[in-house]
Image (tube, rainbow, N blue to C red):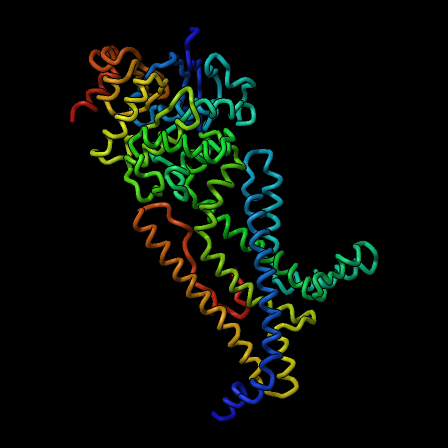
Amino acid sequence: MDVIIEQYFDLDIISDNFSVVLDGFWQTLLLSAIGGALSLTWGLILALLRQTPGRAGAPIRGLAIAYIDTFRGIPMLLILLLVSGSLGAFAAEGTLPQSIGIPRWFGKPDPFWYGIMAITITYGAYMAEVYRAGIEAVPGGQMEAARSLGMSYRQSMRQVIVPQAVSKVIPPLLNDFIALMKDTSLVSVIGFVEVVQAGRDIQSETFNSSALTLGAIFFLIVTIPLARVVDRLIARQQERTSRTGGGAGPAPTPSPATAGPTGGPV
Amino acid sequence: MADAMLQLEGVTKSFGELEVLRGIDLEVAKGEVVCVLGPSGSGKSTMLRCINMLEPPDDGQIYLEGTDICKQGGKGESGWDVDYVRRRVGMVFQQFNLFPHKSAIENVALAQRTVLRRGQGEARTKAAALLKRVGLADKLEEYPERLSGGQQQRVAIARALAMDPHVMLFDEVTSALDPELIKEVLDVMRELADEGMTMVVVTHEMGFASDVGDQVVFMDGGVIVEQGKPKDVLESPKEERTKRFLGLVLEH
């Protein structure tokens, strides 16, 4: 028993390395915040492209569907390796300018930005599907009413459909964000020190896992409250739905804060 | 006819194999109220939806104030001058279709701002005046979920009126309402008719049709079976199908 406690909860190791692990977690938070914001935006754009109306919109719809299917179907780790391996090579060949092939924007190293790209590419596809569920859950009469007032398709989407769709899917989007946050640890594979890598480095120096435990605790401090927020939002939506007796949102999913190894939605 | 607001000539519409409209001819004079009756599935709603191009007709002509709104013909929305039509034709739906994320006054102001490019102040002033006119002066900032069905439908009427339409289409606007709420909506429509609004009203309210209608149209199986003065059609129908329908409706 003592051996276990010492292996995972060695207070000396935790206090000695607290600031290193906290620095790592700060990088995790940065990856999550920037990657999350970009994924939310890119996902909405993809969802709208997927809904392009009419016969003329068919090629755009097709491309959007192909993109979403492709990047939901590939592990993010693979995307990360593809991005980080090839962009640098293109820059070296001169196919891409140095500033894009080896991005060092805002003083952050290139693995950080490769990570942001991989997160956005992958989670944009996941979130596009969430937005799509929201858009499809808005009753058809809403678009008809907007169009019958003379509003264009774009105006109707912007003013009437998207605001309703987004408010319906905030809980599942938050769920995806929790999964995204956990997946940022993959960026350690290309040499970026975030919280998991920081803990691993300490583990290999000390043969003790307590720094990783500390990292896990940092994660839980953020993800558990987020999961509670999701639950509360879902409860509120259900209350609303049962009161107005209609206009139900897409089926809410339980929070994946405690889901599988990488927690990615499938 | 010089003062025709709306003319339909040989309008047809199919959904796949199903022929919903099989050649509709109809003329609506300026200021006239036409009430459309008929069993469900007779094509009444589809006719209205063709008039404002929510469902573009397959064939035939529709003239709005003398202008052929199906200029280029052919199927598909791109062939039709959709904006021209919708800015002149207001529509009210059975299910109200208010925007649930906007208050009553914002519901009425939204399209004024986006379509007519009215400023926020002007749009809201007009919206407030219209909501007052439909008896909802005290509900301006209320959200749809907190309004009764009758109140929601009156907001929807105000919303359509805000675009200064030349014709108003009503698609079974009282069918989803509790009986005690029907009158408040019909009263608003009656006032509109008195003020000279041109209206095409699909309804099951026989009382409204006979009191307010200048013309009653009976549709069945995608064609107009009989039309004329309310008194003639409702009290002494000539066609067998009309008689049967009215018999069934008036029985209870």
- Quadrant location of residue B199? top left
**Residue sitting at x 57%, y 51%:** A43
Q: Is residue A42 visible?
A: yes
Above or below for A134 versus A141: below
In the rendering, at what x and y percent does residue A140 appear?
Answer: 43, 38
**Residue sitting at x 49%, y 40%:** A159
**Residue sitting at x 62%, y 56%:** A121
In the rendering, at what x and y percent does residue A132 appear?
Answer: 50, 48
> Which residue ends up furthest to the bottom in the rendered image?
A2
Above or below for A200 versus B148: below
> Which residue ends up furthest to the left in the rendered image?
B252
Q: Is residue A212 left or right of residue A238?
A: right
Above or below for B113 versus B57: below
- Give the number of callouts: 0
Q: Is residue B50 visible?
A: no
Choose between B247 and A2: the one closer to the eye: A2
In the rendering, at what x and y percent does residue A173 appear?
Answer: 49, 57
**Residue sitting at x 35%, y 43%:** B143
Q: Is residue B10 left or right of residue A122?
A: left
In the rendering, at what x and y percent does residue A49 appear?
Answer: 58, 43
> Which residue ends up furthest to the right in the rendered image?
A93
